Every structure is written in structure tokens, then in C-alpha cells.
Image (tube, grey):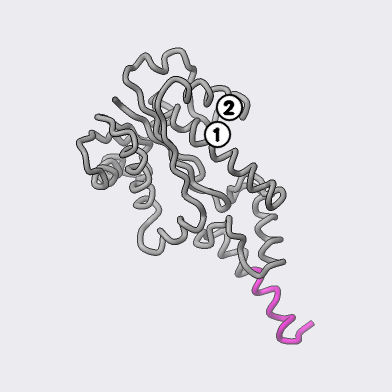
Amino acid sequence: MFAGVDEAGKGAVLGPLVVAAVGCESDTDLETIPVRDSKTLTPAARTDLFGRITSRVVYTVLIIDAGQIDSGRRSMTMNQLMARAHADVIRELMPEIAYVDACDVIASRYGHAVSSHLNFPCRVIAKHHADVNIPVVSAAGIVAKVVRDRLIGELADEYGEIGSGYPSDGTTVAFLENYIKGHGRPPPIARASWETTRQIICRAEQVELPFFSGDK
């Protein structure tokens, strides 16, 4: 078996990081499924492909919530956390070869980092833009993205409109600002270690300081 690994939500400030691995026995397993980079697909297209992928090949998903990310970053870098997560899903499938979308500027270094967390023989091939160029990695990216989108939808049901969860999303930033303003702390679904969250907290504290000091 060979596998592909990709993730969704790595750079998000709200919501989970989802890592997925898809395993194939043959190059023909995905031949009739038009997989490609999940970011280029509409939500409807991703959902359709998700069903076709998961009914055709084996897969596994790892969900890492905001609190786990913050906790992990106290003792490791984000790249190290990603390498461990990629290794975790590879271990679930036990392939002979695993293609991973490199999370390090030096792809080979990232491949070695993933390999260091495996306890069975597996050739890890890390490449930049693997989600674009390697179909089995594209398939994993689609699985990860669909699962994450569903989780974001569930969080929106609980918290209200939160946007995509990414710092570039104005809806996400507005939600985070309003929540921190109203509660004095980030919501449990926010990554407190993210610079976006820190900056919003800092701005909120600066606004509140004159009030508490009696200034008008």
C-alpha cells in the first residue's frame, strides 16, 4: 500500500486542525476520480469527491483541537507538531510508502522528521505542493477539508457565525474580537498561542485600561 497525507486548518486561528491519510493498493484506485487540490474545488464538488474517495479506498482522520495545538506548541514548533500528526495517520494505515505535503521549507528535512516518529518500515516522501501534483495527497486533502468544514459548521451552530476560522477572514476576526471583548478571554475554539489572538487581546486590554484607571 502507498498513502498520501495532507491537512486542513493548519493556519487557522479558530477551529481544529484536521489531518487525513488515504491509502491505495494501486495507481488505478483513484483513476476514475478527478481529485485535485481541495482549495480549487467548490464545497459541493469536494463533498461529492469525498464520498467517492471514502467509498473506494481506505482512509483515516486525526482531529487536533485548538487546546491541543496550544498545549503542543509549549514544547515544540508547529512543524514538529505537524510531523507527529502526519506520522500518526500514516501509522494507522501502515503503508510501505507515504507521500506527504511538506510543512518545512526543506522538504527532505520534513520527510525525515515524519519518519522519526514511525516504528515500522515506511519510505516517507515529502514534497512541496504535493496536494497539487500527487493524486493520493490531493485525495487526502479533500478528505481533511470536508471533515474540517463539517466541524466548523458544528462550531457555528454553537457559537454563531465564525467564518472560515482563518485570520484573513474578516468574519472570523470580528467574532474573535467580539468574544474577547465580551468575555475577557478567547473562546475555547481559538488558538490562544496564535499571534492574531494575542494582538486582539492586547488591543482589548489597551482599550479597557483607561476605563479601569478612571480616565475618560
Q: Is residue 110 above or below residue 212?
A: above
Q: Amino acid at mark 1?
A: Val
Q: Which residue is mark 2?
A: 47
- Residue sitting at x 55%, y 28%: 40
Residue 148 image-quadrant placement = top right
Residue 169 in the image: x percent, y percent?
Answer: 64, 47
Residue 92 image-quadrant placement = top left
Q: Is residue 209 magenta?
A: yes
Q: Residues within 10 Å of mark 2 (few under 14, many from 20)?
A: some
Residue 207 in the image: x percent, y percent?
Answer: 70, 73
Q: Is residue 182 above or below residue 168?
A: below
Q: Amino acid at mark 2?
A: Thr
- Residue sitting at x 48%, y 22%: 55
* Badge 1 element: helix
Whether the residues at callouts 2 and 1 have beta carbons within 8 Å, the answer is yes
Q: Which residue is mark 1?
A: 146
Q: Which residues are magenta?
A: 203-216
Q: From the image, which quarter does the C terminus lie in?
A: bottom right
- Residue sitting at x 51%, y 55%: 66
* Badge 2 element: helix
